[in-house]
């Protein structure tokens, strides 16, 4: 706990600081932390429903409707006028908590996703009312603390968020979170109000910084799935990396190292660095490995610092005059009142930032089906740059700052890092890979399944339904397509890692559209070699790809299992033919090979003739039934002539995806 008489250095004489990072009354800190954690959870839970809506209702029209609903933040001045300053957080945050509870009680639905967006955007504006009088650093600490807790909770559930799943554990977590949020809100409402200052439009724009900050956190910086897929790390290790970055951000903010007047150029440079880093690791050809890991860790510190600087002025309490050293000029005219003025400008600034959350994330995802004029990596890049510019506007303006304290920095960082025990426990409790079912040497059961991000009818994210469909076939090896690992479409869930753990299989991953979307091979068999790559893009919006694993099938034999997803659409046959040519070139006729997946073409098409007529590959069934809802046949298991197939089947009773699982028992015959 920090004494309210903390001191701060301003580059000149020691002056009395404003409110400390952690005030005696913790209601504001806890309310901000819980609200942002719930907001991130509710938005992620709504992404699959929004994605389904864009597919079924027309992508561009649906996206515009969603973005219009996100204008709800601009209703904040009206809510303030009707319900009063205290009523704004009560309505917005109370509504958000009610939506969170409803998501757990009701099967995921589009109306809940819209309700979450409406109350979520309004809650962003309400946070600046709830936090008024807190330092910008304190606000950023609270925001980072909330996202740190959210990260730990997600890791405990394998990144599949509780609102999207059933079960006692999910309900317990929901009730605890909602009860904590209600308690924090009630506690805040019991405190005396803090009067708003007179504020101009320029200073009010600092409140918009929370939008790009949150967009970057959801899409990249606080996503264990993103760090796992782009960093090439197991999910548990990726979780430790994310939590370490958040711990560093909390330690830096709590140290009070911020100076009283931050040069605007430094903020612009920091935002540019953040934007370039975020853009470099996202999109189709995003950088991976150590670069992605460094961006996540450094980006946490940069984004939290920029949010702290930008939020200083909008959070000032009425009557705060600052110091000459802060203001870069003569002392303010104290004869002019500085209370009771224009809080609605802060509301509009925050509403602009709230809109920016989905303006970044939704078009980023839409790009893979309806390409934007520019690469989608530009969007997270612009979010970082915008955060820097908004911070630069407020950089030299007045606002309370905390005193420097190494002890407080160590305490905050250590407190956040303690949560790293969650991914450690997650790793330690991982089930061992189960041995394959007893079969004759040289035989194994194979399933090929385009899981469509594990999204079924109505836009419901349900990896468990996918797992049960695979289990029903008693598969030893699974070729998966359309697998998300941090995509907004799949609620930023690491579906590949979750399924591998749930099915007690090894995961072999291959990126396609980007490093968060691709193909996978899951197997109980020993893996002897692997490979992955992308195919020519052609006329389609997405980069198709492949992944293969050489598995030991017993009897001294191995088999190569390929998982492939080609371009989709009846008008892209030529693109598929080009992709098939490249695929066959990479395969180069290796023996004992299975190429399985969504080929985007049915019997008798030029694509299948190229695959089966000229390459020597053959199918598992002479008269294959439909493999998709709507009677379409697009999914195939093809094998070289030294393999035989028995008990081939298409399980059309499974509706966990818009595709059905295709299965066959494979025998080595040559």
Image (cartoon, rainbow, N blue to C red):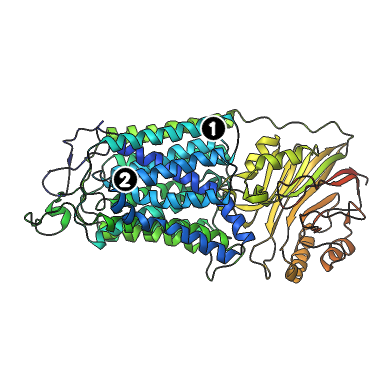
> Where does label 1 land, which residue?
171
Which numbered dot is residue 534?
Answer: none
Q: Does residue 526 show up?
A: no
Mark 2 and 1 residues: CB-CB less than 8 Å, in contact?
A: no
Residue 633 at what x, y percent from top left?
81, 58
Circle 2 Cα neighbour tier, 10 Å, few/some/many (<14 / 14–19 / ≥20):
some
- Residue 225 at x, y percent in the picture: 56, 45
What residue does disc 2 label? 87
Residue occupying image coordinates x 56% and y 58%: 365
The kind of secondary structure element at disc 1 is helix
* Residue positioned 60% across, 66% down in the render: 370
Frontmost of labels 2 and 1 is: 2
Q: Is residue 571 left or right of residue 274?
A: right
Mark 2, secondary structure of its residue: helix
Instruction: Give 28 or 217, whichever is nearer the viewer.
Output: 28
Compared with residue 235, is residue 230 higher up or lower down, i.e. above or below?
A: below
Quadrant holding the N terminus: top left
> Marks 2 and 1, how far apart in space?
28 Å
Camera sees residue 260: yes
- Residue visible at 22% across and 61% down in the picture: 200
Judging depth in this view, the residue of 588 and 199 nearest the camera is 199
Task: Using residue 630 as the reference point, say whether residue 18 is left or right of it.
Answer: left
Q: Which residue lies most toward the left here?
A: 335
Residues packed near mark 1 inside 10 Å, few (<14), some (14 to 19) or many (20 plus): some
- In the displayed structure image, the side of residue 625 where residue 364 appears, left or right: left
Q: Position of residue 257 (x, y in %)?
A: 26, 44
Query: How many numbered circles does the render carry?
Result: 2
Q: Position of residue 240 (x, y in %)?
A: 49, 37
Q: Dividing the picture into quarters, in which one does residue 50 lie?
A: bottom right
Sequence-wise, which precedes: disc 2 or disc 1? 2
């Amino acid at each position: 706990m920090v004494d309210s008489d903390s001191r701060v250095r301003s580059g000149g004489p020691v002056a009395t600081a404003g409110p400390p990072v952690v005030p005696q009354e913790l209601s504001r800190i806890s309310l901000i932390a819980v609200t942002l954690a719930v907001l991130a959870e509710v938005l992620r839970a709504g992404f699959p429903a929004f994605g389904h809506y864009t597919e079924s209702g027309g992508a561009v029209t649906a996206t515009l409707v969603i973005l219009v609903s996100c204008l709800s933040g601009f209703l904040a001045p009206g809510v303030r006028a009707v319900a009063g300053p205290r009523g704004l957080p009560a309505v917005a945050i109370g509504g958000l908590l009610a939506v969170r509870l409803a998501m757990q009680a009701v099967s995921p639905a589009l109306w809940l996703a819209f309700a979450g967006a409406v109350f979520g955007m309004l809650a962003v504006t309400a946070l600046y009312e709830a936090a008024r009088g807190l330092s910008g650093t304190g606000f950023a600490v609270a925001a980072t603390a909330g996202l740190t807790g959210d990260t730990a909770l997600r890791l405990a559930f394998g990144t599949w968020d509780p609102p999207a799943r059933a079960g006692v554990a999910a309900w317990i977590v929901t009730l605890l979170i909602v009860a904590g949020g209600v308690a924090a809100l009630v506690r805040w409402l019991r405190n005396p109000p803090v009067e708003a200052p007179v504020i101009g439009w320029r200073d009010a724009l600092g409140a918009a910084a929370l939008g790009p900050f949150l967009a970057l956190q959801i899409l990249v910086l606080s996503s264990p799935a993103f760090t796992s897929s782009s960093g090439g790390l197991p999910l548990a290790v990726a979780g430790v990396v994310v939590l370490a970055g958040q711990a560093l951000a909390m330690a830096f903010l709590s140290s009070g190292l911020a100076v009283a007047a931050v040069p605007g150029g430094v903020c612009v440079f920091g935002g540019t660095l953040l934007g370039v880093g975020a853009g470099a690791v996202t999109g189709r050809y995003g950088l991976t490995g150590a670069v992605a890991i460094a961006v996540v860790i450094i980006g946490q510190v940069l984004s939290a610092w920029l949010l702290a600087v930008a939020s200083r002025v909008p959070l000032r309490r009425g009557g705060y005059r600052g110091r000459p050293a802060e203001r870069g000029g003569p002392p303010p005219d104290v004869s002019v009142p500085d209370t009771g003025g224009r809080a609605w400008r802060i509301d509009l600034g925050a509403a602009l930032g709230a809109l920016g959350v989905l303006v970044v994330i939704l078009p980023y995802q839409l790009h893979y089906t309806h390409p934007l004029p520019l690469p989608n990596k530009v969007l997270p890049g612009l979010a970082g740059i915008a955060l820097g510019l908004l911070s630069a506007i407020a950089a030299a303006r007045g606002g309370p700052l905390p005193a420097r304290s190494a002890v407080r920095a160590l305490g905050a960082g250590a407190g956040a890092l303690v949560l790293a025990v969650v991914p450690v426990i997650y790793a330690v409790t991982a089930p061992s890979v189960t041995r394959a079912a007893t079969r004759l040497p040289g035989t194994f059961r194979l399933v090929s399944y385009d899981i469509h991000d594990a999204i079924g009818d109505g836009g419901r994210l349900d990896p468990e339904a996918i797992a049960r469909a695979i289990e029903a076939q008693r598969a030893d090896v699974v070729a998966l397509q359309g697998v998300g690992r941090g995509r907004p479409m799949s609620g930023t869930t690491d579906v590949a890692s979750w399924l591998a753990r749930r099915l007690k299989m090894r995961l072999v991953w291959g990126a396609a559209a980007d490093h968060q979307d691709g193909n996978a091979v899951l197997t109980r068999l020993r893996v002897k070699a692997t490979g992955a790559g992308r195919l020519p893009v052609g006329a389609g919006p997405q980069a198709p790809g492949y992944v293969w694993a050489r598995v030991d099938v017993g009897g001294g034999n191995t088999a190569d299992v390929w998982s492939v997803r080609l371009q989709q659409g009846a008008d892209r046959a030529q693109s598929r033919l080009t992709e098939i040519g490249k695929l066959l070139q990479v395969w180069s006729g290796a023996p004992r090979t299975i190429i399985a997946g969504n080929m985007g073409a049915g019997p008798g098409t030029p694509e299948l003739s190229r695959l089966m007529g000229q390459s020597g590959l053959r199918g598992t069934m002479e008269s294959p039934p439909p493999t998709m809802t709507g009677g379409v046949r697009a999914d195939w298991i093809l094998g070289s002539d030294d393999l035989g197939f028995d008990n081939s089947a298409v399980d059309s009773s499974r509706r966990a995806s818009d595709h059905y699982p295709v299965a066959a028992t494979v025998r080595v015959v040559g």
